[in-house]
């Protein structure tokens, strides 16, 4: 049940440069994939196309072989398929770590006790259950990023899309966040991560290299 890009090209407006150029790739369910390339090479753009946030100027994005055109259909699909983790951990600052981790489940209509139970279990797995009651604004960058990864995992998406998730973290927090990112693997949660970090990329099954919007290579580390 793959996610497929078929000859995808993108530019942010008529007359602007192409920032994705005829990219074709297929990512299987549960697969772990890294997108690597210099700053400006199009990693964030490609992630947001894969995550159905940006509709490409040309080409097609397919989920399970079906086209994803139509804004309404894309909105419903992307909520059920993807959880995002960003470079700068983003959370509601006054709400507790637990509330933040439970939020996507509440939005989906899961009742509060169940959402809290699932979120608490994720925080425990990530080794941050002692922080559950603390407001997000009082957490360190590394702690907060783990809470955000817990929030992503709690939603049990098919893929976690992570945009330079360790870019702002020190060495130790990076290792903890990288471990956290792959915790969903046993239940089949895939990871698609844009990163400069070779150690993080090496933990993925496939690594795509991007240069100036072009896919220039694929490696299996
Ligand atoms: N909203 C936007 N409008 C216009 N240009 C953009 C926009 N977002 C990104 N770009 C341009 O697209 C190119 C690729 O950017 P991006 O996908 O963010 O690359 P990366 O994540 O690899 O740094 C860059 O040249 C960037 O300036
Ligand atoms: Mg980027």
Image (cartoon, grey):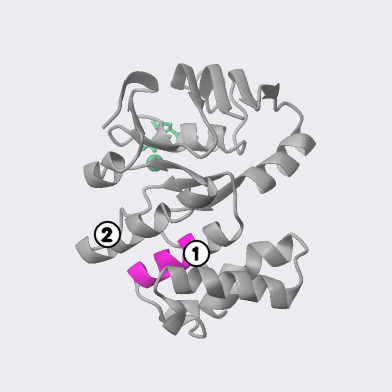
- Left or right placement of residue 90 versus residue 179 in this view: right
Q: Main secondary structure of the magenta part?
A: helix
Quarter of the figure with the C terminus? top left
Whether 187 is among the magenta residues is no
Q: Residues within 10 Å of mark 2 (few under 14, many from 20)?
A: some
> Mark 2 = which residue?
175
Q: Which residues are magenta?
A: 141-149
Percent x, y of residue 57: 59, 21
- Left or right placement of residue 174 versus residue 76 in this view: left
Can residue 17 be seen from the camera position used here? Answer: no
Going from the N terminus, do you reach mark 2 or mark 1 first? 1
| As drawn, 49 above or below 66 | below
| As drawn, 178 above or below 100 | above
Tell me the number on the disc at residue 150.
1
Tell me the CA gap for discs 2 and 1: 15 Å
Q: Quadrant of ligand 1?
A: top left
Number of marks drawn: 2
Q: Nearer the viewer, residue 180 or 43?
A: 180
| As drawn, 35 above or below 144 | above
Callout 2 secondary element: helix
Residue at image x 64%, y 67%?
103
Residue at image x 46%, y 79%?
129
Callout 1 secondary element: helix
Percent x, y of residue 10: 52, 22
Q: Quadrant of residue 17?
A: top left
Whether 147 is among the magenta residues is yes
């Amino acid at each position: 049940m793959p996610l497929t890009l078929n000859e995808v090209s993108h530019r942010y407006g008529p007359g602007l440069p192409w920032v994705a150029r005829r990219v074709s790739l297929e990512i299987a369910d549960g697969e772990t994939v890294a997108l690597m390339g210099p700053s400006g090479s199009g990693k964030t753009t490609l992630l947001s196309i894969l995550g159905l946030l940006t509709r490409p100027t040309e080409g097609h994005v397919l989920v399970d072989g079906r086209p994803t055109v139509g804004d309404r259909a894309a909105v419903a699909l992307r909520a059920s398929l993807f959880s995002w983790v960003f470079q700068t951990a983003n959370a509601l600052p006054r709400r507790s770590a637990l509330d933040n981790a439970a939020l996507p489940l509440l939005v989906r209509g899961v009742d509060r006790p169940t959402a809290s139970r699932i979120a608490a279990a994720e925080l425990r797995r990530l080794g941050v259950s002692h922080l559950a009651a603390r407001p997000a604004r009082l957490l360190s960058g590394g702690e907060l990023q783990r809470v955000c990864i817990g929030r992503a995992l709690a939603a049990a998406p098919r893929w976690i899309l992570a945009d330079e998730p360790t870019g702002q973290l020190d060495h130790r927090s990076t290792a903890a966040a990288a471990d956290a990112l792959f915790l969903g693997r046993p239940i089949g949660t895939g990871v698609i991560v844009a990163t400069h970090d070779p150690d993080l990329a090496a933990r993925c099954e496939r690594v795509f290299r991007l240069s100036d919007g072009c896919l220039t290579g694929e490696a299996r580390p």
